[in-house]
Amino acid sequence: MRYVTNLPSETKEEENVVIPMSDGTRLSARVWRPVSSDSEPVPAVLEYIPYRKRDLTAVRDSMHHPYIAGHGYACVRVDLRGTGDSEGVLTDEYLEQEQHDAEDILAWIADQPWCDGATGMMGLSWGAFAALQVAARQPPSLRAIVIASFTDDRYADDMHYMGGAMLSDNLAEAGTMFAYATCPPDPAVVGECWREMWHERLEATRPWVVEWLRHQRRDEYWRHASVCEEYGAVHCPVLASSGWADGYSNAVMRLLGNLDVPRKGLIGPWSHKFPHLGEPGPAIGYLQEVVRWWDHWLKGAENGVMDGPMLQTWMQESVPPSTSYEERPGRWVGEPSWPSPNVERVTHPLTRHRIGAAGGTAVKTEGGGAPEAMTVQSPLSVGQFAGKWASYNAPPDLPYDQREEDGGSLVFDTEPLTEPVEILGPVTVDLDVSVSEPVATVAARLSDVAPDGSATRVSYGVLNLTRFDGGDAPTALEPGRRYRATLDLNAVAQSFPRGHRVRLSLSTSYWPLAWPPPRRVLLSVYEGSSTLTLPVRPTAPPDAGPPVSPFGEPECTPPLDVTQLTDPEERWLVTRDLVGYNAELEIVKDRGLVRFEDIGLDVGRRARERYTSVAEDFTSVRGESTWTMSFRRDDWDVRVETHTALTSDEEQFFVNATLDGYENGRRVFSRTWNETLPRDLL
């Protein structure tokens, strides 16, 4: 990373700016802008997230907002209603109130004397969701957006219900926001009313997972703010990016294929991070690309930003399995449009333990009848090496060697490849199946198998078969009846070398990444009529020479000065007790105690996730999310502790949660929840 201090414009910072909403609620903002904007107004860029601008995102904010401001923009970083130093409460994600507030904020920005009336929005994750969702509301000042790590489909392509199957991240993310939404504002900013504001948040908050479990189908709750419901509502240009190690690897291609506005897509090897901070590497000069985008769409500069390919992506080369990588070998490739004319979808039949040649048919039995079904009844342990739904690369959280997982799966291999094969885009499995239970889940994994047998997962997907025709109206399955279902695996760019095999693995459980069905399932897959479709892209010609990166070196402004007071801790531990047959995955992410020197504040963050099960009892699974958040300055010492546990039997989910608030070591708030919710064919 190159730190830049000499920028085109001298800037100034306004640390605590109050923005009034139409209902009288006041939101807290931080503004960086050129000094010259006092007399020469500039375009403005908004980032709008719930993660506390004064401390928890202050380091990251200091690296990119002053950089963009130094190139002639006013950058406005706003805490959502009910978070950080903003008034109000936050009770759920992407509410109508949140989006209405964003419209108020944009109108306020456009009306400031330092703004010329043109605005943009940018962000990662929640900030990207907000920008895309607000763009679909078409506020008059919004000219363009820049988004990273996002989805346009809140139900089926987020951390909630992948393919209609509930992800454990549904609990993990709910636990995160349970903690973040109950943190206090800073008395140094809001004054003596901080305690009243804090207790208002504590009183209003509930475990978010309860609401998410009330909506197990694709209903109006999820359709709200899912831009896939009406792509035509987005009228402004979009620069969209993500990473292959991220959970949000699909939406970039969907936007490119469905929006009817100027658009560009960028997908690297990264986890859930901005591309200039991308891990695994290589990181890129993303902020330079962002400035070029704003220069064109907010200032009208003719800088060729729309030249070149619509999609630029990192074609990943083969690597041994590992839970983390510093760098992913590969090269940048470009596509003129999406879907691309360079990508051919090639369908292979699934025969007994083999991925057949394209265009092939199933082999008949000696008696001339159709081949018998292939069956699998996976143990509950399949999935313990699946890694996180969305990698953060801290702790190491990518999938490990898939051979142990394959032992409990139905496996199909190609013959060793005689030539390299490259794929780019979503992978599809069409299944002709029957099951033994009314509720069944199928997980599909695509792996790169090296000559030594090691298997690196390339992509995966999960499908709740009761939602085989969509998540709107699930249907209980009739045991023994044959169904046709399409399972979509995450999009990917991957090169398979000569001598390697491509492997498809099917399992009936994928715990703890996905919540298992109520009972163990026997899955029958009918060969020949079940297929794997790969998006094959021609490999580069051998005389093309070494690839040249289209991006500059990562750069930003120097990060805010902080001091690490206690050591951070990261842990990802899988254990099995072969006496009691207990299995456990424990994840610890402790940032340690950090001092923000500029405001004299010590902040601590510790998260622990725990997923357990017993033998083959599918109703024994249990997920837990525990958070501790602490804030300390002089005689101000506040701590929030949250705990959420999720269990189930064959008919119901059980949520048990606690929230405790401490001031100067004394507990001043405590609440417990015990909720029971029906399983809706899940």
Image (tube, rainbow, N blue to C red):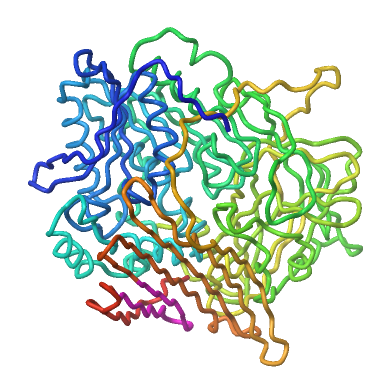
Indicate the position of residue 226 as horizontal and vertical percent values: 36, 45
Nearest to the observer: residue 536 or residue 637:
637
Residue 216 higher or lower than 115, as above or below: below
Number of numbered tags placed on the structure image: 0
Q: Is residue 373 magenta?
A: no
Instruction: Please state if 33 lies on the left or on the right of 242 as rendered.
Output: left
Check the picture and name the quadrant holding the N terminus. Answer: top right
- Magenta stretch mostly in which secondary structure? strand
Q: Residue furthest bottom?
A: 579
240 lies left or right of 359: left
Image quarter of residue 300: top left
Residue at the extreme front of the image, as rendered? 634
Q: In which image quadrant can residue 366 be found?
A: bottom right
Residue 650 counted in the magenta span: yes
* Residue 327 picture location, percent across and down: 70, 41
Front-lying residue, 79 or 373: 79
Left or right: where does residue 546 sit relative to residue 153? right
User: x%, y% of residue 468?
Assistant: 53, 58
Vertical relation: 278 (above or below) 82: above
Residue 655: % across, % down: 38, 78
The image quarter in which residue 244 lies: top right
Furthest residue in direction top, as rendered: 302
Residues 136 and 93: in front is: 93
Q: Residue at x 37, y 80 (%)?
A: 656
What stretch of residues is rendered in magenta?
641-660
Residue at 29% in and 81% down: 672
